[in-house]
Image: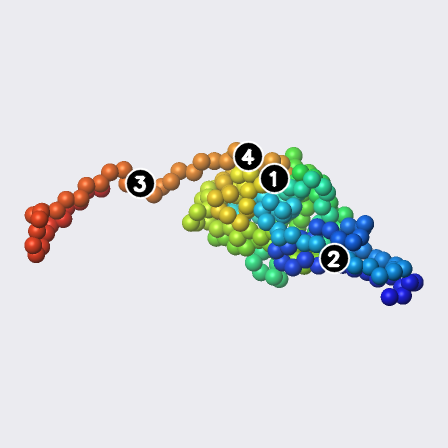
Amino acid sequence: YFGDVPITLTALPSIGFRFIGWEGLSQQEESVTLYLTQDLNVQALFEEVTADTASVVINEINYHSSDEFNPEDWIELFNSSSEPVDISSWQFKDSNDEHVFEFPQNTILEEGEYLVVCQDTLLFNSAFPEVENYIGNFDFGLSASGEELRIFNLYGLITDLVNYDDENDWPLLPDGNGNTLELADASYNNSLPESWQASVGHGTPGTQNSEGVTEANDELQITNYELNNYPNPFNPVTTISFNI
């Protein structure tokens, strides 16, 4: 090293991990500049990003509006950490890497704060005039049949990912009925379909999620059955009758 030449160290976590601090330094920012006067041992520390450690999460999704109420597509982010998170120059993408929305400079999510990212801010404001914490516009739509939504940090690493769907174990009401797809609790793992529910009404953009709607299960449920055969014992054939 040279005493009068600055050395900059930047912690770059791999996908699925986040930087949590430096061992051997008093400074704890992701990028630090040092002027060395003696040998120094420094180690960057990381931890795996899970549902418990991811700080900025996708908390609500409007991917298929109803014909009667159409604010266009939007997602809601939530800062679940106990400190502000600067998401300036972070990126929101769907499953197509060419579909990119970059967060403006000085975009900071305070502790417990929500932020709505809109496809069309004019239509969104017309539908939700009381909501003020929103930004936009992103020039692509969200798939009505489900797709992957991703949030990338300043270093191009994925910090949150939701692969929603409109069938299987996912709530069905958000698919064109006016409801949104929302986390039942912001602390839940948003990669799991059972963590999501259909919102009450048209959702709660910019605020805490609703209590959710209990969706009816249209599948038939077997409540009783009978299975008989005759003759019994039999050899070599039998007749089996059943009722469900």
Q: Nearer the viewer, mark 1 or mark 4?
A: 4
* Comes first in the chain, label 1 or label 4: 1
Residue 170 drawn at (x, y percent): 46, 46
**How many C-alpha atoms fall within 10 Å of the one at disc 1: few (<14), some, or many (≥20)?**
many
Three-letter code, disc 2: Gln
Q: Nearer the viewer, mark 3 or mark 2?
A: 2
Name the residue located 57 percent from the left edge and 36 percent from the top edge: 209
In which quadrant will I find the N terminus?
bottom right
Q: Nearer the viewer, mark 1 or mark 3?
A: 3
Q: Which residue is mark 2?
A: 43
Residue 77, picture quadrant: top right
Does residue 10 appear left or right of residue 176 in this picture? right
Q: Which residue is mark 3?
A: 221
Query: Considering only vertical position in the picture, is 13 above or below 71?
Result: below
* Comes first in the chain, label 3 or label 2: 2
Three-letter code, disc 4: Ser
Residue 70 drawn at (x, y percent): 55, 43
Mark 1 vs mark 3, CA separation in Å = 36 Å
Residue 121, picture quadrant: top right
Q: How is the image coloured?
A: rainbow
In which quadrant will I find the C terminus?
top left
